[in-house]
Amino acid sequence: MALLEIKDLTLRFGGLCAVNALSLEIEEGSIRSLIGPNGAGKTCVFNCLTGFYKPSDGEMLFQGQSLVNKKPHIITYMGMARTFQNLRLFKGMSVLENVMSGMHCRTSAAFLTTTLRTKGQREEEKHIREVSEECLDFVGIHDKKHFIASNLPYGDQRKVEWARALATQPKMLLLDEPAAGLNKDEKSRLIELMHRIRDEREVTIFLIEHDMGLVMKISEKIFVIDYGVKIAEGTAQEVRDNPKVVEAYLGKEEEEETA
Amino acid sequence: MALHEILLQQLFNGLLIGSFYGLVAIGYSMVYGIIKLLNFAHGDIYMIGAFSGLIFLSIASPYIGAGWPSLILGMLITMLLVGLLGVLIQRVAYRPMLKAPRLSILITALAVSMILYNTVMLLSAGRYRAFNVDVSSESFFLGPLRLTETRVVLIVAAFALMFIMHMFITKTMYGKAMRAISLDRDTCQLMGIDVFKIIALTFFVGSALAAAAGIMAGVYYGTIHFFMGFLIGLKAFTAAVIGGIGIIPGAMLGGLLLGLLEAFGTQIPFIGTEWKDVFSFAFLILFLIFKPNGLLGRSESERM
Amino acid sequence: MAETNKKTKLKNPFEGIIDKLFIMFENKIYLYGFFAELVIFLVIFPNTSSRFTQEIMTNLFFYVVVCLGLNIIVGYAGLLHLGYAAFFAVGAYTTGILSSRMGMDFWLTIPFSIVAAVIAGLAIGFPTLRLRGDYLAIVTLGFGEITRLTIRNLDVTGGAIGLIGIQRPEFFGITLNQISHFYYMFFILAIIAIIVSHRLENSRMGRAWEYIREDEDAAAAMGINVVTSRLYAFVIGSSFGAVAGSFFAAKMTAISPDSFMFIHSVMFLMAVVLGGMGKIPGVVLGSILVVLIPEVARGIGPYRLLIFGFLLLIIMLYRPQGIWPEKPTISTDE
């Protein structure tokens, strides 16, 4: 059975159809990409999956459980983590504190244990810290753990976001344009990191990306959507040769020229 | 009196009080719609409107009397001045806070409210002031309904203001710009709408309407007090929520409904007038639980 | 948006000194030494001072407790609460009714007042926090007024006159009836409030509140239940107020609706905002200012609220983080 199964997902805003009867499956342990021209509805798919938008129609099954009508925090708890297209770090907090947020849903200390500072609570705090530091180490910015997040250079802020998502201990990671704003060097390290996340942590990766070179290099399978409709799916080569895909992208370029 | 006569009388009273609530609620709702601010100072603007009207009357009555002509003139001048006060407050206190966290701008609004009512408290020595007008208070009957000239004029004026407001919002460029800004401020800026000007205009219109309601309340009740804005601020919020906050016709509808509710609610045995405010507030909480988007509000089901 | 980018920051004249103090107190021995001296000073204080100053200090400790409770809601969770006096009233009247009408022992009434505050907190917090956080401000404002009116209108609460004959608490056989007794009682309460606040701040819960304040959506995406976390803060903060109310009732032995007006809620909020929301030393500083300014400058009497109103506006416009400075932070610029 696939880890994630989307059936006829539809999202309408008023009369506008952002996602239209989209179906796709993602197998456990794979790396999949979702591509499409600007405004094709890619981020909308992610927002539906993570509970930020409520789909108008369709079904989304994650590990056999429905994601429809679930709140974002429940979906994260179920094992689906995400990053945002524009960084959404907790800007005024330290890097370590940012990553510790991911452990929230895996821990339980509440008012009484906190105020009494029980043994269990202190051990849990230590555990949160250890796991978070390990995640920071994994993405390679452990040495900056005490810096305020917004003071880091852009590339490092991206890494904090990945570490934060990893700290939720996900089964599946949704990356929304992870390479945006990164230089060539950082991009090649990102590819390496994504492989390590998949191989060492056994996390399935589903990403949206505009950098075709990166997409072609990393994903075993690519889904292409345009105007909310899936127009192609297959390996990098298959997608590249698909006339519909070419049309979607070239058509868009023509529009840009006339605009 | 027969039951249907009581009900009819309460219907009239409810609509009259409700139209005051509605006028104040419009400003509340507009400001919330356009900059997402719960303007606590709005009730105090209503109070300042009442006091400004009183000051105008005390200056003008030796020359032109305190009858309807001078009341109408006073109302227009007060609406203009208080509207400008609203714009000034907006410029000094709220505009620098537009990008600040929500909590900061709420506290700023609270500070403005404190400044306004404490100033009036010091100036009026904290006492009730008589709102003396020279208009007929003789009652006459319209079928079973006992009316006075004052009440009829007030309710006609309030509904006229609401109607003008409705036309302004739906038919003019400015009204359209306001509605557009409440949908997406940044896009409006890109489309060449002078957002700050429209926000200032919103404050002007909202404050002017609240001031009008303040004067009418002064005429209706006969006395005014520095703390009179507090409770009506709460009720205007309730009215705005009932109608769907940010929706202007909703605010009018909500105000009228709340007025009716209070008028009829106090007729229910065991719920006397001393429980009137408890009653309308309990209604607000129940409303928030069961119909949070208001009567005219769209549900926000797309965004969870 | 030119002016929003412009940094309008009011320079704090003590910034330099306070920064140095921060650095000094990085060394835990200095910090604990300072606390120890302060505690010793405050413990021997009643022996060296008049009843009047003891009364003021007791009032100050009381403010610290109440404002730290309010700080959990306003400072930590970022929710504006304008009816805090109502929760304080819930606690005071629960103790008052149980003690004066049923003769219940003071200490036994405290759990009841906490339960009453939790129920009231859930009743108004649940519908409003599920919607928009800022609705809470006005709903609490209304709740404050409604609570006061209800207390005035009911018989069981003694109407406008209030309750009298609330029993003095006993503590190991000593009846607490001297001002110095209450001085120590509120001193201990204040210390407990500080410890509880400190522990909450540096915990999983405290961090969750901070995440939500920084970015609600990102917090939700990290698996934090935004509504529940806020509700927790609201209920915990309200319970603080209720406990303080119970002790207030025991100290006064008579309570009336006039002690729970809107203006009291505003003064509590003032203390929290003035010193610095979300910072324990800031809240303590704010409490000191709000309690001591009217005592020191008696001449300002009727202008007090107007001056506080302007002060609040100036703080929000030019120094929203409050008078107490932020901790110096590490950045890449260094």
Image: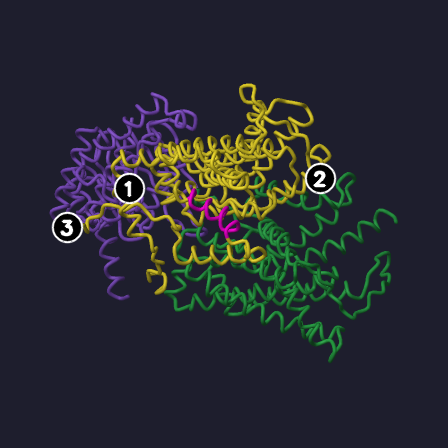
Q: x, y percentage for residue B91?
A: 46, 65
Q: Which residues are magenta?
A: C283-296
Tell whether A80 sits left or right of C71: left
Residue B191 location, quadrant: bottom left
In front: C207, or B6? C207
- Amino acid at circle 1: Thr
Residue underneath mark 1:
A83
At a point 64% along the width and 68% down the height, the residue shown is B52
- Neighbourhood count class around disc 2 (C-alpha, 10 Å): few under 14, some 14–19, many 20 upward: some
Residue C161's tag is: 2
Residue C247 location, quadrant: top right
- Neighbourhood count class around disc 1 (C-alpha, 10 Å): few under 14, some 14–19, many 20 upward: many
Residue underneath mark 3:
A183
Using the numbered discs, state the Cα–Cα distance from disc 1 to disc 3 in whole angstroms.
Answer: 19 Å
In front: B281, or A24? B281
In the picture, one chain is yellow; tell me its letter. C
Q: Colour of chain B?
A: green
In the picture, one chain is purple; tell me its letter. A
Secondary element type, mark 3 = loop
**Chain name for mark 2:** C
- Amino acid at circle 3: Asn
**Quadrant position of the N terminus of chain C in the picture:** bottom left
